[in-house]
Image (spheres, grey):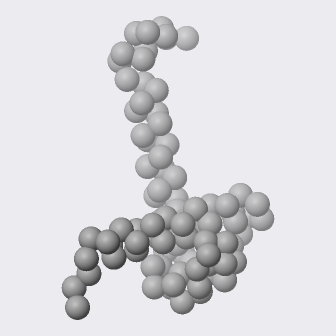
């Protein structure tokens, strides 16, 4: 049975919740387990492993998401219009 766009949207929301939980666990304790991440995201450990092959894959995905957010923030702050309005300090 093919996945619908609603299913894909739910899968992506679950994945993002899991990645957010990875980031929060690392921020609080410096480490994470699949069980704690799943619990924090309101999910189950098998769901964690449905989205990520292992903890390294989850950590890599969380890092890539964080770097994407950083690039987007820097790009917004360094737009020529912003720099011209605020000047180069």
Q: On screen, 37 above or below 70?
A: below
Q: Quadrant of residue 17?
A: bottom right
**Residue found 26% across the figure and 81% down from its top:** 3
Residue 75, image x and y in percent?
Answer: 40, 32
In this rendering, position of residue 56 left or right of residue 1: right
Q: What residue occupies the far front of the structure in this picture?
A: 6
In this rendering, position of residue 37 left or right of residue 52: right
Q: What residue occupies the far left of the structure in this picture?
A: 2
Residue 85, image x and y in percent?
Answer: 43, 9
In this rendering, position of residue 35 left or right of residue 8: right
Judging depth in this view, the residue of 65 and 46 nearest the camera is 46
Judging depth in this view, the residue of 6 and 36 nearest the camera is 6
Residue 38, image x and y in percent?
Answer: 62, 78
Question: Is residue 37 among what the camera can see?
Answer: no
Q: Quadrant of residue 89?
A: top right
Q: Quadrant of the N terminus?
A: bottom left
**Residue found 46% across the figure and 33% down from its top:** 74
Give the total of numbered labels: 0
In this rendering, position of residue 70 left or right of residue 22: left
Question: Is residue 74 among what the camera can see?
Answer: yes
Q: Quadrant of residue 82?
A: top left
**Residue found 46% across the figure and 58% down from its top:** 64
Residue 36, image x and y in percent?
Answer: 69, 77
**Residue found 52% across the figure and 59% down from its top:** 63
């Amino acid at each position: 049975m093919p996945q619908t766009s609603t299913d894909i949207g739910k899968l992506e929301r679950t994945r993002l919740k899991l990645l957010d939980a990875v980031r929060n666990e690392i921020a609080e304790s410096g480490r994470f387990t699949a069980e704690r991440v799943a619990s924090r995201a309101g999910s189950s450990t098998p769901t964690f492993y449905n989205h990520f092959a292992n903890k390294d894959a989850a950590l890599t995905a969380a890092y890539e998401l964080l770097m994407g957010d950083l690039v987007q923030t820097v790009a917004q702050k360094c737009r020529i219009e912003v720099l011209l309005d605020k000047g180069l300090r």
